[in-house]
Image (cartoon, rainbow, N blue to C red):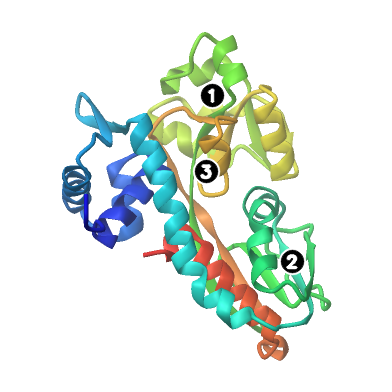
Amino acid sequence: MSRIPSTQALRALECFARHGTVWGAADELNLTRSAVSHQLRLLERDLGFALFNRVGTRIELTPRGRAYAADVRSALSVIAGSAARNAGHGLSGQLTVSCTPGFAAFWLAPRIGEFRAICPDVDLHIVTPRRLDDVSNPDVDLFITFGDGTMQGLEVELLQEVDFAPLVSPVLANRLGGVKTPQDLLRTDLLHLGDNADWRRWMKAAGLPQAAADKGPVFADMNLVYAATIAGQGVSMGDIFICNGAMDTGQLIRVTDIQIKSPGSYYLGIPTQKQGLEPARAFRSWIIGALPQRNR
């Protein structure tokens, strides 16, 4: 193939690879399902090799398709980060970022080297608050919170909306002889963060008794929930966004296509008195470019 495929088609493939469904990609890209399907068909035709297997009415990536999608994701990240890299050249000083534990551990920590490459002279400190929406620390220059976005005295920006779906480790899936349907989840413990509200909402969406959500241990921290999930201690109601990397590497498996929209989202907030700090502005520029929903 001598020409580069359309950017829209490449974005459609990258989104499909992360979500695993056409409708998930369509929702992120603000397109219709038919438009996304059309872009994927055109891309496959232009490339000249099979990206997808057709399974009934569904499609799934072939091994070659997954490898190509990973290359596309890397290329889009390079393009999105170009402006941030140039803007950050020569910056120095200290930057303290407060970030929710789950976002910090599963999304930010594996990528922090990208920001360090952009701003190597910035003295970066990452702290985690006790509450997901806490913005009270006066030493923090930039907050990443989870909630409704209400942050008095800060310039607030939506980073990422969140969907939840059941996640299981390969170890537990094998122990149970396979976990493929919503009913299979009733054969093991459910792992909860704070309370069982998210599981009860999911049970309702799946057409299962909401009382089935009442079993299993409750944890106070998302990292503990995911540690228990990866260790095969039960099934968690996972944040699809921050767990995408664990799913890509096979540490976690998504059980079904049934998901629920979280009432909260991830937000970025910069205190009014710190909006002029160049390291904070550079970090904001980098993270906006690195987030998948902003690479459109």
Q: Is residue 264 above or below residue 188?
A: below
Foreground of the two, 67 or 202: 67
- Disc with the residue nearer the chain's start (2 vs 1): 2
Q: Secondary structure at mark 3?
A: helix
Q: Nearer the viewer, residue 276 or 267?
A: 276
Can the viewer see residue 29 in this picture?
Answer: yes
Q: Residues within 10 Å of mark 3 (few under 14, many from 20)?
A: some
First in residue order: circle 3 vs circle 1: 1
Q: Tell me which amino acid carries mark 3.
A: Asn
Quadrant of residue 258 in the image? top left
x and y, in percent, of residue 38 in the image: 16, 49
Task: Please name the residue that numbered disc 3 is placed on.
Answer: 244
What residue is rendered at 54% in x and 26% in y? 211
Helix, strand or loop under label 1:
helix
The alpha-carbon separation of the residues under discs 3 and 1 comes to 26 Å
Q: Considering the numbered disc 2 on the image, is that residue within a helix, a strand or a loop?
A: strand
Q: Which residue is mark 2?
A: 98
* Location of residue 115 with respect to 273 vertically, above or below: above
Task: Point out the tag, 2 or 3, that comes first from the N-terminus.
Answer: 2
At horizontal 20% and vertical 51% (from top left) the residue drawn is 39
Mark 2 closeness class: few <14, some 14–19, many ≥20 residues within 10 Å? many
Residue 261 lies, in percent from the top left, at 44, 49
In the image, what residue type sits under mark 1? Ala
Q: Nearer the viewer, mark 3 or mark 1?
A: 3
State the residue at coordinates (71%, 83%).
91
Q: Which residue is mark 1?
A: 212
